[in-house]
Image: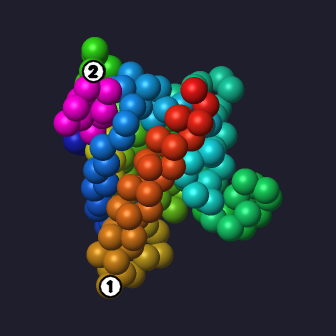
Amino acid sequence: MNDEHIPTGPGGRVVFDSVREVAMTPQAAWDELVDWAGHSAWVPLTHVEVDPNDPARFTAWSGPGAARWGRRLSLRDEMVAVEMTFNESRGRCRVHKLGPILVGFADLTVTPGSQVGHTRIQWHEEVHVKFLPRLFTVIVGKLSAALFRSALGRMERLAHRQH
């Protein structure tokens, strides 16, 4: 991907990686990761709305009451999936975060795990957070990484309950 098209913006730069191996096939993990509306079920405090005219565009509302009250007490994160590639057991998706508070990108990758039927998921994110003082970027990155590792575990548990 040509990096000149990656959104950038003002604010503190937060970078994090969350890696988790899940007891799911790569195809099942991929399907869950790119089901944008489905993130509402497993990403804490988050409700996702997909653009009915463009399934690659979606908005996540995160914060207290996001699922119940939607926009009133939540951070709006507008996104577009600009690349989605899955071949056999490996996949990569790049999502551009378009603002208004978070600007940057997230890369989601799936690869075969350490045993058959398992998948390694990596969630890498680089965003500029408007109004975030640079002093707090490292701690926000560490908290975000832990949150997404936990969310991937929740995704795995919910997927197992559905089958």
Residue drawn 37% across and 36% down? 23
Above or below residue 106? Residue 13 is below
Given this view, does label 2 or label 1 mark the residue nearer the observer?
Answer: 2
Tell me which residue sits at (29%, 62%) in the image: 15
The x and y percentages for residue 40 are 62, 45
The answer to which image quadrant residue 65 occupies is bottom right
Q: Is residue 42 located in the magenta-colored stretch of the structure? A: no
Q: Which mark is residue 63?
A: none
Extreme-bottom residue of the structure: 135
Q: Is residue 113 left or right of residue 159?
A: left
Mark 1: give few (<14), some (14-19) or many (20+) Cα within 10 Å. few
On the rendered structure, is 27 left or right of 16? right
Label 1 amino acid? Leu
Q: Circle 2 is placed at which residue position?
A: 89
The stretch in magenta equals 107-120
Q: How far across and how far down the image is residue 20, in percent?
A: 31, 48
Q: Residues within 10 Å of mark 2 (few under 14, many from 20)?
A: some
Q: Which mark is residue 135?
A: 1
Q: How is the image coloured?
A: rainbow
**Is 121 drawn above or below residue 125 in the view shown?**
above
Residue at image position (38%, 55%) is: 149
Residue at the farthest right position: 69
The N terminus is located in which quarter?
A: top left
The amino acid at mark 2 is Ser
Q: Secondary structure at mark 2?
A: loop
Camera sees residue 50:
yes
Q: Using the numbered discs, state the Cα–Cα distance from disc 2 to disc 1 in whole angstroms.
A: 40 Å
Q: Between disc 2 and disc 1, whose residue precedes? A: 2
Camera-nearest residue between 64 and 136: 64
- Is residue 82 positioned above or below 71 on the image? above
Q: Residue 86 versus residue 72: which sits nearer the camera?
A: 86
Q: Residue at x 33, y 70 (%)?
A: 142
